[in-house]
């Protein structure tokens, strides 16, 4: 998650994940196409069998000929069935391989996206739609479609009139497919968007189910979600009705044309232009020529959704830029420079921060204060790369955030968000940032986890939990109090001895003992030369800060030494007739 300049730098090379995954599945699709070619050749077997039976066996009463033809026909059908099974298995394996190759980079890319919460579940569902479409009837119909002209050519060989009839039927079905695409494309996209919005709303409510029950909000939210579902269902019904109309027309046309082919064949047979067996063979050939087109018409809705999913995935990967490949820079010292930084809200409709510029030297402790809604949390999220910049630049040791390899920068930054944001897993996993190690590295990892917990005063209460560091937490730290969760989040920030600590109201839920331990931990980090940026409403932990940043309405109001800022704020309050703040912080 970077600012526009950083993102433009990352786009110098397209992320190859999607292209590589599709290329890896290409062999499966090519072999499936080859099997389709053999299958369509074998689909001629019923027509040839019928033609030979009526033209050779019946007139000559040749039982031996019938037996041999039947054996050949059964062998062809058995081979056809085996090839069809192999083609289906190939497509299923292609879908599984696509998931195996693309699942990891897709989830990793979504976690980096600025609007991950909004688009994450949507894109994963669309990705599954794309995978399922690969194994569906629509793709099989696409493989069979190139063979329709061959069947029409065989019809021309039987008689030009039969060939012209097959061409006319195909033209009608293609027209219906075109009309289906034009009539349902927008409806399907709107229905899909409405459905995904409904999913997101329900997921958000489920995530806060405890609050919903406590405040008695069930009835109101149920009505809201039902209304969303009704809107999505209405759009889906319109799309389904429109698609059903064209699908029914296509099926009706195919059945009618297949039967009319019998009539035309009978007429030509009466005029002795074709044999009796050709009547039935032509009907089967025309039916086979039209089947892929009808299949495409029937599967068109899924194919539209799959196409939209592909473009969505392509956009996500292109926006993410190349994966890796950046030069590892010297180890982080901790100097932070903010240059004319502006940050927009999540919707991108208004600026939350306007032209912020400041510089923090390595080893300094800086407090960020200001009234609610001033943009303090937005500033620290931008500092750690959790929220993209609309304009301006953030530099660490002179290098833009986008120029740092993500793994290197993440290891050098400890961040405590306003909400603890713990994840489902053990306490050890949460503190260790879900890193995995084996052998001697596992022992070192455990030692570092315990060191980080001891440093922020979390070790003692962790040992009193049922399984100590192996105690499993639910989503968002369920199983811990808010204060305990905040200490675990602080231990996670201290894990790995980062050179920069960015803390957003780390004492908001701590008791007096916890705040004293936090103050001691910050003092220890400051002595170790760690750069510290702290947002605080309860300003006791800012007593040791070197400088203070005062934000108002998203703009930098003051940035100076702690003493100078306190003096100016106290003077302003005295002029306004307000009592000076206790401790003189802000």
Image (tube, rainbow, N blue to C red):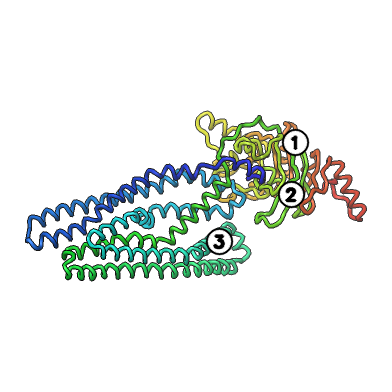
Q: CA distance from mark 2 to mark 1?
A: 22 Å
- Residue where numbered disc 3 is placed: 197
Label 3 Cα crowd, 10 Å radius (few <14 / some 14-19 / many 20+)? some
Question: What residue would you read off at disc 1?
Answer: 523
- From the viewer's perspective, tell me whether residue 233 is left or right of residue 465: left
Secondary structure of the residue carrying tag 1 is helix
- Count residues near mark 1 (Cα–Cα under 10 Å), then give few for <14, some for 14-19, many for 20+: some
Q: Which residue is mark 2?
A: 376
The one nearer the camera, 357 or 215, is: 357
Instruction: Check the image and name the residue furthest to the top.
Output: 440
- Residue drawn at (45%, 63%), measured in percent from left and top? 181
Judge whether residue 313 can be spotted in this image. yes
Q: Position of residue 31 (x, y in %)?
A: 34, 45
Task: Locate residue 272: give its quadrant.
Answer: bottom left
Q: Nearer the viewer, mark 2 or mark 1?
A: 2
Task: Name the N-terminal-most of marks 3 and 1.
Answer: 3
SS at mark 2 in the image: helix
| Image label count | 3
């Amino acid at each position: 998650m970077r600012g526009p300049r950083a993102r433009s730098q990352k786009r110098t090379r397209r992320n190859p994940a999607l292209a590589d995954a599709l290329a890896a599945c290409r062999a499966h699709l090519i072999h499936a196409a080859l099997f389709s070619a053999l299958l369509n050749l074998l689909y001629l077997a019923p027509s040839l069998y019928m033609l030979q039976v009526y033209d050779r066996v019946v007139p000559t009463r040749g039982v031996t000929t019938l037996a041999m033809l039947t054996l050949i026909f059964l062998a062809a059908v058995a081979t056809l069935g085996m090839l069809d099974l192999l083609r289906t298995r190939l497509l299923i394996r292609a879908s599984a391989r696509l998931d195996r190759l693309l699942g990891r980079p897709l989830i990793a890319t979504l976690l980096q996206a600025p609007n991950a919460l909004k688009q994450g579940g949507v894109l994963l569902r669309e990705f599954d739609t794309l995978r399922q479409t690969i194994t569906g009837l629509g793709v099989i119909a696409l493989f069979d479609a190139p063979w329709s002209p061959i069947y029409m050519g065989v019809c021309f060989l039987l008689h030009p009139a039969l060939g012209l009839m097959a061409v006319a039927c195909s033209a009608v079905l293609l027209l219906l497919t075109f009309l289906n695409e034009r009539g349902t494309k927008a409806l399907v996209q709107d229905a899909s968007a409405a459905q995904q919005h409904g999913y997101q709303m329900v997921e958000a409510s489920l995530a806060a189910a405890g609050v919903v029950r406590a405040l008695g909000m069930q009835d109101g939210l149920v009505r809201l979600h039902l209304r969303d579902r009704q809107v999505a269902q209405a759009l889906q019904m319109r799309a389904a009705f429109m698609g059903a109309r064209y699908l029914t027309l296509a099926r009706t046309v195919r059945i009618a044309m297949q039967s009319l082919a019998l009539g035309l064949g009978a007429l030509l047979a009466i005029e002795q232009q074709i044999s009796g067996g050709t009547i039935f063979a032509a009907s089967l050939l025309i039916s086979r020529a039209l089947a892929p087109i009808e299949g495409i018409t029937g599967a068109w809705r899924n194919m539209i959704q799959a196409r939209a999913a592909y473009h969505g995935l392509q956009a996500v990967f292109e926006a993410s830029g190349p994966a890796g490949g950046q030069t590892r820079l010297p180890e982080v010292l901790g100097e932070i420079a903010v240059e004319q930084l502006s940050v927009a809200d999540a919707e991108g409709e208004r600026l939350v921060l306007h032209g912020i510029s400041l510089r923090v030297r390595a080893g300094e402790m800086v407090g960020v204060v200001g009234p609610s809604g001033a943009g303090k949390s937005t500033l620290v999220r931008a500092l750690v790369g959790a929220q993209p910049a609309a304009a301006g630049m953030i530099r660490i040791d002179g290098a833009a955030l986008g120029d740092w390899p993500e793994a290197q920068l993440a290891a050098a930054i400890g961040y405590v968000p306003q909400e603890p944001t713990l994840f489902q897993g053990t306490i050890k996993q949460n503190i260790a940032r879900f890193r995995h190690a084996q052998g001697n590295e596992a022992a070192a990892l455990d030692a570092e986890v315990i060191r980080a917990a001891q440093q922020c005063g979390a070790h003692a209460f962790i040992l009193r939990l049922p399984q100590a560091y192996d105690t499993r937490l639910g989503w968002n730290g369920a199983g811990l109090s808010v204060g305990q969760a905040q200490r675990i989040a602080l231990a996670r920030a201290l894990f790995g001895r980062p050179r920069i600590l960015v803390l957003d109201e780390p004492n908001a839920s701590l008791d007096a003992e916890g705040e004293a331990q936090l103050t001691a931990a910050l003092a220890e980090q400051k002595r170790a030369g760690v750069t510290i940026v702290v947002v605080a409403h309860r300003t006791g932990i800012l007593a040791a800060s070197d400088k203070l940043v005062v934000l108002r309405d998203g703009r930098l109001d003051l940035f100076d030494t702690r003493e100078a800022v306190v003096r100016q704020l106290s003077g302003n309050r005295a002029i306004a007739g307000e009592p000076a703040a206790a401790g003189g912080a802000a």
